[in-house]
Image (cartoon, rainbow, N blue to C red):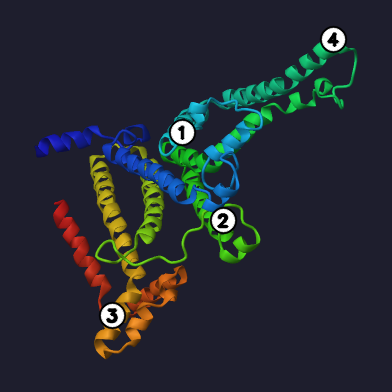
Amino acid sequence: MELGKKNSEKSETLHIPALRRKWQIIVLQIISTGSLLLLLKRMSEIYGPCSDQFIIDHNQDAWCPSYEHTRGLMWLDSRGGLLIPDFLLGVNQTGTMSLIGPLLMCTAAVVAIDRFWASSFEIQTRIKQGIAVAFGAWAIIPFIFSWIMATISSGFHFPWNSSSSLNHIGELFSPMALVAELIFLGVVFAPILAGLVGIWGLSKRAITWAVGYYIVIIAFHSILTFEPIMSEVDVGLNAIPTQIGEGTMFWGLVSPLAWSLLGIALLILLFLESGTAVIGHMEYAASLPEESKKDSEFVRQFNNVVNSHLLQLGVVIALVAITTALALAFDDLMVSIVGILEGTQWTGQVRESLELQMTYGKVISAGLFIMAVAGLRFLVPWQTVSGYIESGIARIRS
C-alpha cells in the first residue's frame, strides 16, 4: 500500500491543469459554491421581503428596494412586458423556485465568461465588436423601419412627433428594456455571478467583490431601516427587530434571530476562506520551478498542506461560531456570576433591562468578551495551548 502511494505521488504533478482535478481542490470549490448559494437563500429570506405596511398600502406590483428580484421584474412587466422568459426570471414563482431560473443563467454566463477569457485577444475584440453591433442594430433598424413605414402610409414627418403613432424615438431605447431587466436581476445575482466566476475562474478579485457587495447590502439595509430614518423616509424595507431576543438555541447561547444573522456571517466567511484558499494553493504551485512541480517530495508536501487546510477550515469555522455565540451571551454570564457572588436584586434588574436585549447591548456583550479574553492572556499560556492543539491534530492525521 505504501508503494502504491509513492507511485501515485510520482505520477502526480503540480501543474495547474492537474491541480484543478485534485479532489481536495474540487472539495474546496464545492464548499465555496455551496456556501454562496446558501448565502443567497438566507439573504433573500431575511432581507428580501418588503414591510407589512408597504404591502398593505400598495398592490403586489409595487416595488421596494429589498434584496429580491421578482417584485421589481413584476413592476417592469406591468409597464410594458418582459423580454426574458418568465421561467428564466423566476417571475410568478415563490421561494427557492424563483431562484432556479436566474441561477441557470448565472451558470451559463460563468461558462461563457470562462470561454471568453480563454480565447485569444483577437477573438475577444471580435466578440466585443459583435455585441456592440448587435445592440446598435437592435436600436437603429426598428427605428428606421417604423419611420419609413409610417412615412409611406402617412407622409413625411419627423420621427419625434406629438402623435404617438408618428413618434418613433421610443424604438431607439428598446434595448434599455433588457438592460433594466438585467439591472433588477443584478441587484440579487451580481454577487452570485461574481462569486462563481471567482471560484471556478480563479479570480480573487471577483470573490472579494462579492463579499464586499453583501456587506454593502447589509449596511444599506441597516441604514435605511434605522428608526429615525424610517420616520422620515420609509422605502418599504422590512426592518430587523432591534431586540435580539432570549437565547433559546445551543444551550441558551443565541436566539433564533441572532443565529440567522450569525449564519450569514459564517457563510460569508466560509465562502471567502474556501474560495481564496484554492487560489492561494494554485498561486503557490504556479510559483514553483518546473523541476519542483514534478518532484514527489513537493507533491507530498502540497498534499499535506491542502489536507491540513481542509481540516483547519472546519475547526476554524466551528471555533468562530462558538466564540461568537459566547460573546453574544457573555453579558448573561457576567450577570450570573455577579448574582452568585452578591445575591442581590441588581442582577435580575439588569437581566430584564431592554438595553442588553437590543442590538447595541449585544455589542457591549461582545466588547466585554474581548476584554475578558485579552485579560486571560496574562493567566493562560495561549501559545502552549495552541501547541497542544496542533500536536493533537497532527496525531489525528497520522
Q: What residue sits right under mark 2 in the picture?
A: 220
Q: Are marks 4 and 2 in contact (CB under 8 Å)?
A: no
Q: CA distance from mark 3 to mark 1?
A: 49 Å
Amino acid type of the residue tagged 1 in the rendering: Gln
Amino acid type of the residue tagged 2 in the rendering: Phe
Q: CA distance from mark 2 to mark 1?
A: 27 Å
Residue situated furthest right in the rendering: 156
Q: Earlier in the sequence, mark 2 or mark 1?
A: 1
Q: Is residue 248 left or right of residue 120?
A: left
Up-down: is 369 above or below 150?
below
- Count of labels in the image: 4
SS of the residue at dot 3?
helix
Q: CA distance from mark 1 to mark 4?
A: 44 Å
Q: Earlier in the sequence, mark 4 or mark 2?
A: 4
Residue depicted at x 28% and y 45%: 302
Q: Earlier in the sequence, mark 3 or mark 4?
A: 4
Q: What residue sits right under mark 1 in the picture?
A: 93
SS of the residue at dot 2?
helix
Residue 226 visible? The answer is yes
Q: CA distance from mark 3 to mark 4?
A: 87 Å
SS of the residue at dot 1?
loop
Of circles 2 and 1, the one toward us is: 1
